[in-house]
Amino acid sequence: MTSSVRRPIVFLGTPRAGADVLQQLIAHHDVELVITQPDKRRGRGGQLIPSAVKQVAMENDIPVGHDMMSLRDLAPHPRRIGVVVAYGRIIPTDILQTCPMINIHFSLLPRWRGAAPVERAIMAGDEETGVCIMDVEPTLDTGAVHAVAKTRIEDSDTAETLTQRLSEMGSALLLEVLARTEMRAAAQSGEPTYAHKIESDERFILWNGSGTDIWRRTRALPCFAVLEGKRVGLTEVVDEPGISGVPGTITAEGVVCAENGGVRLVRVQPEGKKVMNASDWLRGLRSVQTLCFATTHTRPPISDS
């Protein structure tokens, strides 16, 4: 159900998931202002590229700002509400007093409060996750919850596919909440866990721990390993829990041993090349029987830029 009454909306968000939600809001409500992170320089030419949210706003002739303090200048409106999706900053108390806000959070609160809930849920082996529509508070993801929708985390899910599904679920749930005559919420209950920001070191696979953990991590993050001093992106792997061997060693079939179990390489991206089938990559190696991925930090991890 969607609302027949169009609310004035202030939208705060930055990445693709936020842009998808913004598109839905534009169709049903009056989005009067978008606040997003500043343009970033990307690519070899260092060109300034607007966020995905900003691109959607510009396509729909919606004013865009990069400073949430501009919300203080809005004329009061009894039905105005702010919608926050992956904005990336804490909203100060005085802004929330000017404009109450709700947030689409991609987890089942209070599990996975924080910066990387989708990635942490996959890496932890959670069987399900979901979206919560919650009140925004100055503290991190602690607000009362208006509505919840759940989904199973499939073995085939990556952070990208799961985020897309949660974005679609969140958009529909958000419109239902905004359609309510009275927006009532319930306090979170249960033991909170925190989805800490992803560090670059977590993308560097060193073959310690279990193959299952490595498989989960490659689904959650763009990971790589190092072979003979060069990075190899682990684009797609399959869990192989029943194998044993020296950590880092590669079989002719493309199975790599971890401390416990291992993974089978399906698609890889050798340094400086495009993504390719692991079988084709292996055929081009001089002697797979003598090769072993690095098991220590032999070179610095790839940066997040």
Image: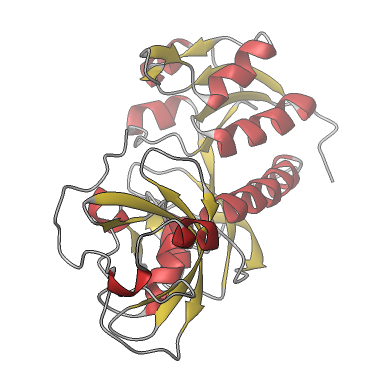
Q: Residue 141: give x, y in percent of width and height.
A: 41, 51
Q: Quadrant of residue 52?
A: top right
- Colouring convention used in this rendered image of the protein: secondary structure
Camera-side residue of 109 and 207: 207
Q: Residue 32: give x, y in percent of width and height.
A: 62, 15
Camera-side residue of 128 and 257: 257
**Residue drawn where x is 30% and y is 50% of the image:** 231
Camera-side residue of 144 and 205: 205
Residue 181's place in the image compared with 285, above or below, is above
Name the residue at the front extreme. 286
Residue 43's place in the image compared with 14, above or below, is above
Residue 274's place in the image compared with 61, above or below, is below
**Residue drawn where x is 63% and y is 46% of the image:** 167
Q: Is residue 31 left or right of residue 186?
A: right
Q: Quadrant of residue 256?
A: bottom left
**Residue drawn where x is 51% and y is 60% of the image:** 278
Q: Quadrant of the C terminus?
A: top left
Q: Quadrant of residue 128?
A: bottom right
Query: Disc count in the image?
Result: 0
Q: Residue 276: give x, y in percent of width and height.
A: 54, 50
Residue 228's place in the image compared with 80, above or below, is below
**Residue drawn where x is 73% and y is 41% of the image:** 175
Q: From this viewpoint, is residue 199 visible?
A: no
Q: Residue 161: give x, y in percent of width and height.
A: 61, 53
Camera-side residue of 164 and 285: 285
